[in-house]
């Protein structure tokens, strides 16, 4: 039995307006067999990096052939291009504004096409809602089996950016940043075990993590290891160091949020970073 085609949605639309419903309606009108999966509609408004993080953490868990619609589009209606990114397993439909940057960095082979086949678009075309009029129908036709080559020519000058990487300040200090704060108040940094191997493992070097006015000196294995209201560090499921608390919002306890500097201070060791 053939599997129903899967289309995922990642947007900054929220759920208070009609936008998500309209996008789903367009998809189902073109491809009634499509199974639509919501990855996230709570990407921070206009925040392309937050959208890039959201889709990068989810796409690889879907079956081959999945079409991912990713719309965080502050430049809607401008000259920015609609694109299709094709990897060995998936397709992505998005604005060409860097929101797929982390996909480019993770996949060995990528093909990016500028979508110019206007006969696939919904008409009349709105200047302010390309998710409904361009991205949704293109995704629906892709999931229906239309070859990506039919939508436009391949390009190599697509927009991409490098996510912020931790940097060594001196021989004993590594500086990172909070990339996002999740629903639970966990402060997700850009620091991985590769960036600071000395603080991970069974016998870590003495260290302290300074974030805001708070100092953390211990990495827990699970959230429940912390006492209620205790702020600690943990290696989260995204693969990044998190500043967290047990059943509390660490961001509120620390009094800081996205964009806050996170400094790892090492004693008797040299700070390491693979960032450039």
Image (tube, rainbow, N blue to C red):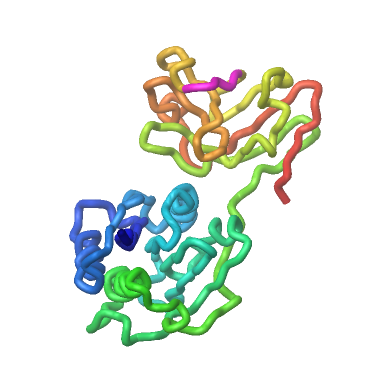
Q: Residue at x 78, y 36 (%)?
A: 170
- Give x and y (percent) for residue 49: 49, 54
> Can residue 123 be seen here?
yes
**Picture quadrant of residue 169:** top right
Query: Looking at this rendering, what residue extends furthest in the front direction?
Result: 1
Residue name at image x 51 percent, y 64 percent: 98
Estimate the x, y position of residue 74 in percent, counting from the top left.
Answer: 39, 65
Above or below, comparing residue 112 to residue 249 in the picture: below
Residue 6: quarter of image: bottom left
x and y percent of residue 51 in the render? Answer: 43, 54
Magenta stretch: dominant SS?
Answer: loop
Check residue 160 for magenta coloring.
no
Q: In this view, does 170 lie above or below 213?
A: below
**Bounds of the magenta segment:** 218-222
Would residue 35 be found to the left or right of residue 88 on screen? Answer: left
Residue 131 shown left or right of residue 228 in the figure: left
In this rendering, does residue 70 appear at all?
Answer: no
Say which residue appears at 66% left-offset and 30% top-offset: 264
- Residue at image x 75%, y 37%? 272
- Report the number of numbered marks: 0
Quadrant of the image containing the N terminus? bottom left
Q: In this view, does 130 lie above or below 201?
A: below
Quarter-of-image position of residue 115 = bottom left
């Amino acid at each position: 039995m053939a599997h129903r085609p899967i289309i995922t949605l990642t947007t900054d639309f929220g759920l208070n307006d009609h936008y998500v419903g309209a996008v789903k309606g367009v998809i189902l009108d073109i491809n009634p067999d499509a199974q639509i999966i919501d990855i996230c509609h709570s990407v921070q408004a206009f925040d392309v990096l937050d959208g890039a993080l959201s889709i990068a953490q989810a796409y690889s868990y879907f079956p081959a052939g999945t079409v991912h619609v990713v719309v965080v589009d502050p430049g809607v209606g401008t000259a920015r291009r609609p694109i299709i990114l094709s990897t060995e397993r998936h397709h992505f439909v998005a604005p060409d504004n860097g929101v797929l940057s982390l996909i480019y960095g993770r996949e060995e082979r990528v093909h990016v096409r500028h979508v110019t086949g206007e006969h696939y678009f919904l008409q009349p075309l709105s200047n302010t809602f390309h998710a409904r009029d361009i991205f949704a129908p293109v995704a629906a036709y892709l999931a229906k089996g239309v070859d990506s080559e039919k939508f436009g020519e391949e390009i190599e000058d697509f927009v991409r950016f490098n996510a912020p990487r931790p940097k060594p300040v001196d021989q004993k200090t590594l500086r990172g940043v909070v990339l996002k704060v999740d629903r639970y108040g966990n402060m997700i940094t850009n620091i991985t075990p590769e960036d600071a191997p000395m603080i991970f493992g069974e016998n870590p070097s003495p260290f302290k993590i300074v974030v805001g006015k708070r100092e953390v000196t211990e990495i827990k294995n699970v959230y429940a290891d912390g006492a209620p209201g205790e702020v600690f560090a943990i290696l989260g499921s995204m693969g990044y160091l998190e500043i967290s608390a047990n059943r509390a919002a660490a961001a509120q306890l620390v009094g800081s949020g996205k964009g806050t500097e996170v400094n790892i201070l090492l004693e008797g060791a040299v700070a390491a970073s693979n960032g450039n």
